[in-house]
Image (cartoon, grey):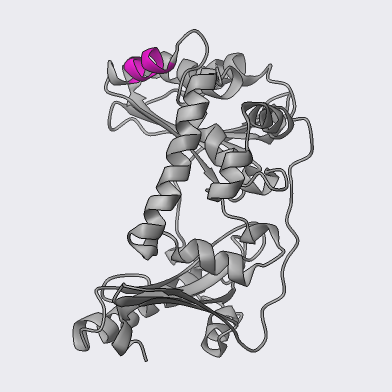
Amino acid sequence: MIRAVLLAGVTLLSAFALPVHAQGSASGAVRLPPFEQHALANGAVLVLMEKRDTPLVSMRAVLRGGSIGDAAGKDGSAALLAELLQKGAGKRDATAFAEAIESVGGELAASAQTESLAVGASFLARDIDLMVELVADALLRPRLDPREFAKARTLAVQSIAAAKDADPRDLIDIYGDAWLFRGHPYGRPTEGSEKSLESISLNDLKAYYAAQCGGDRLIITVVGDIRAKEMERRLEAAFGGWRKAGVAAPIASAMARVQGRRVLLVDKPGVTQAYFWLGNVGADRTDPARAAQTLVNTVFGGRFTSMLNTELRIKTGLTYGANSGFARLTKPGAFQIDSYAQTEKTS
């Protein structure tokens, strides 16, 4: 029997919520390379950094919103849309779009997170025009082909079903967030569920795109072998005319930390390992103590040589891995600890 154990509100997590302030002298401050920031007339923000030591350019276009903009009962819409953005856009169908990327040795991928939908690309500097064209096509002119939609939805449903029958580590964080953030947007799974995905139609994705995607939500960062002024002109020509999103970007409210303990047990007969997740509301991405929290977590559970992994894997051999970490969102996400062990050794 497998037992997935999820605890919310465990007392030890409060140590990571304390306002610890890192001290440092001005001489030891981190210095970032110089960059330029520009705003287009439609609200899009450009962040450009010249780095000419290698003939490469990386570009990331992020839309504020993400899965918290999924309609009620349609969890997984943003994730399905991200998949379709790569499956044909502009004058190219899915095959031609993929071939355009591969023919020059480039990379392009779209993804959805809780509060963002993004397209990232990396190309040789000589192919910068093609890169901008493909990213702009994906965001402004996605084909949303019915056949590609049907394949993407089927694969998403099958992937969730396979994860339930395979390694629960692929699902434990999803269950943990759902248990901790019950009734809150952060508890909704970005990947959706088998039931919610089956209910999503192509028209639902088109409605999501019209409402949640637009130039006023867009942040573009470009780093590499570029000339900032030329890049600004390219991006303004490609994205400056994009309409605004149909609605304002969704913003979640902050959730109070859980007091006491809440325990969820999920039994799965016939499997010999128990997986556990312990969590509480942690800290947001702009927390003034972020650097100190990250440092402490790195030592505690954020790397292979951390205290958690040393005790549970190296010293006692109870597990192959244990870790901890923060989900950094606009409002505080989860701070969680997770691991697994043979069921009889869980205690």
Q: Nearer the viewer, residue 92 or 340?
A: 340
- How many numbered discs sit on the rendered protein? 0
Q: Nearer the viewer, residue 314 or 199?
A: 199
Q: Nearer the viewer, residue 122 or 211?
A: 211
- In the displayed structure, would residue 178 be above or below residue 272? above
Specify the quadrant that holds the C terminus.
Answer: bottom left
Residue 48 showing in the rendered view: no
- State yes or no: residue 47 in magenta: no
Magenta-highlighted residues: 94-101
On the image, the x and y values in percent for residue 127 come to 35, 16
- Relative to 167, is 31 on the left or the right? right
- In the displayed structure, would residue 100 be above or below residue 218? above
- In the displayed structure, would residue 309 be above or below residue 146? below
Task: Farthest residue to the top: give it.
Answer: 91
Residue 303 showing in the rendered view: yes
Residue occupying the point 28% across, 86% down:
311
Magenta: main secondary structure: helix
Task: Farthest residue to the bottom: give it.
Answer: 347
Q: Nearer the viewer, residue 242 or 67?
A: 67
On the image, the x and y values in percent for residue 48 come to 51, 32
Task: Farthest residue to the right: give it.
Answer: 247
On the image, the x and y values in percent for residue 59 come to 45, 31
